[in-house]
């Protein structure tokens, strides 16, 4: 029995317990790009691994929050914001009655320590202390809320989520949550007096509307349609290693299965992401998929899931 591609990420927009999820966790664009270019061009391996690991940590913290948080608040999962010329990222933002919590989740693994000068290290390697980055985000977020006339108390927390993570000589800091303290942290959030109203929701929606979607610091290598390897990337392991079995694509490497129709739609979105200017036609998608999927199947899915522009030979989809 193959693994289904459907169980991937936490996806729900509704009131879960007492909180309101304004933006569910999504695969960051930087990761989608890295997955695609890594499979088709053999680049960005390290970036892909890093962001993949970060996302796993965030999803794990989301699951704990969904299970334990019962207090009234608005939650936004994953934001890239800009204040002035400076961009900053927030993994999870929680709006309570009078407070906003900015949460950075780190999925670091292994033994880390602070040296005598207070610098963070893993073995002999210096690591940029994520707390500095979080303090920067807090300062920029404070500016941003003032710009829109809000005056919430802002507090930020750094959550180390991986149970295999140990931090030695850590200076006392209640804004740093170690793996063994995560449950206690969520319980504390439940104790806080909170109520939310339309004003809180409006602020959450404003923040989502300001989301830059992709990291402005992302640096993608040059690529072209012609230069990328063709075929379907597996929906689970993202390798170009699927074959057609009836109406499903099956992965030789990880065993994942996906209906061909779903794969076609996913591939069209992949082309659109990589080549936003390209006119999507049946021929383009056919070539992209390495000629393994019939033009009839591709055309049927284009008509069903996308908007067609033009007629006959000049028809393309958006
Ligand atoms: Zn696979």
Image (cartoon, helix red, strand yellow):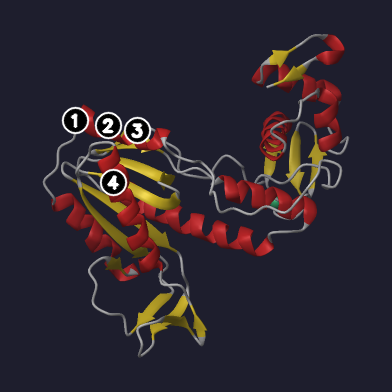
Q: Nearer the viewer, residue 200 or 136?
A: 136
Distance in Å between CA atoms under marks 1 and 3: 15 Å
Image height of 78 relative to 266, above or below: below
Residue labelled 4 has its Cβ within 8 Å of some atom of ligand 1: no
Q: Which residue is mark 4?
A: 94
Determine if residue 126 is in view. Answer: yes
Distance in Å between CA atoms under marks 2 and 3: 9 Å
Residue 216 percent location from the top left of the image: 54, 49
Q: Mark 1 or mark 3, which is nearer to you?
A: 3
Question: In this image, 61 relative to 201: left or right?
Answer: right
Distance in Å between CA atoms under marks 3 and 4: 14 Å
Residue 72 percent location from the top left of the image: 20, 40
Q: Which residue is mark 2?
A: 201
- Give the tally of numbered discs: 4
As helix, strand or loop, the secondary structure at mark 3 comes to helix
Q: Name which of mark 3 and mark 4 comes first in the sequence.
A: 4
As helix, strand or loop, the secondary structure at mark 4 comes to strand
Please give the label number shown on residue 206: 3
- Classify mark 1: residues with Cα within 10 Å, few (<14), some (14-19) or many (20+): few
Distance in Å between CA atoms under marks 4 and 1: 14 Å
Residue 137 percent location from the top left of the image: 36, 56
Q: Which residue is mark 1?
A: 197
Which residue is pictured at 30% across the width and 60% down the height?
A: 157
Q: Are marks 2 and 4 in contact (CB under 8 Å)?
A: no
Image height of 68 relative to 164, above or below: above
Outermost front residue: 84
């Amino acid at each position: 029995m193959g693994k289904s591609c459907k169980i991937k990420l936490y996806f729900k927009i509704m009131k879960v317990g007492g909180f309101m999820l304004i933006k569910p966790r999504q695969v960051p664009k930087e990761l989608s790009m890295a997955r695609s270019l890594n499979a088709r061009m053999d680049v960005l391996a390290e970036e892909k691994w890093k962001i993949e690991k970060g996302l796993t940590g965030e999803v794990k913290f989301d699951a704990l929050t969904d299970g334990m948080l019962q207090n009234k608040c608005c939650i936004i999962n994953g934001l890239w914001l800009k204040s002035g010329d400076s961009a900053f990222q927030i993994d999870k933002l929680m709006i309570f009655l009078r407070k906003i919590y900015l949460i950075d989740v780190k999925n670091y693994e292994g033994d880390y320590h602070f040296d005598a000068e207070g610098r963070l290290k893993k073995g002999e390697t210096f690591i940029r202390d994520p707390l500095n980055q979080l303090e920067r985000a807090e300062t920029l977020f404070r500016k941003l809320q003032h710009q829109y006339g809000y005056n919430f108390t802002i507090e930020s927390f750094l959550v180390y989520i991986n149970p295999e993570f140990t931090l030695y000589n850590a200076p006392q800091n209640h804004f740093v949550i170690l793996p063994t303290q995560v449950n206690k942290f969520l319980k504390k959030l439940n104790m806080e007096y909170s109520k939310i109203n339309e004003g809180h929701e409006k602020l959450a929606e404003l923040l989502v509307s300001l989301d830059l979607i992709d990291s402005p610091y992302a640096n993608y290598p040059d690529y072209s349609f012609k230069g990328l390897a063709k075929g379907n990337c597996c929906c689970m392991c993202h390798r170009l290693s699927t074959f057609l079995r009836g109406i499903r694509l099956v992965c030789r490497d990880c065993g994942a299965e996906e209906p061909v129709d779903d794969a076609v739609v996913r591939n069209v979105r992949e082309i659109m992401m990589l080549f936003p200017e390209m006119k999507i036609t049946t021929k383009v998608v056919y070539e992209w998929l390495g000629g393994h999927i019939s033009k009839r199947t591709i055309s049927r899915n284009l008509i069903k899931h996308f908007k067609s522009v033009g007629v006959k030979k000049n028809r393309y989809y958006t």
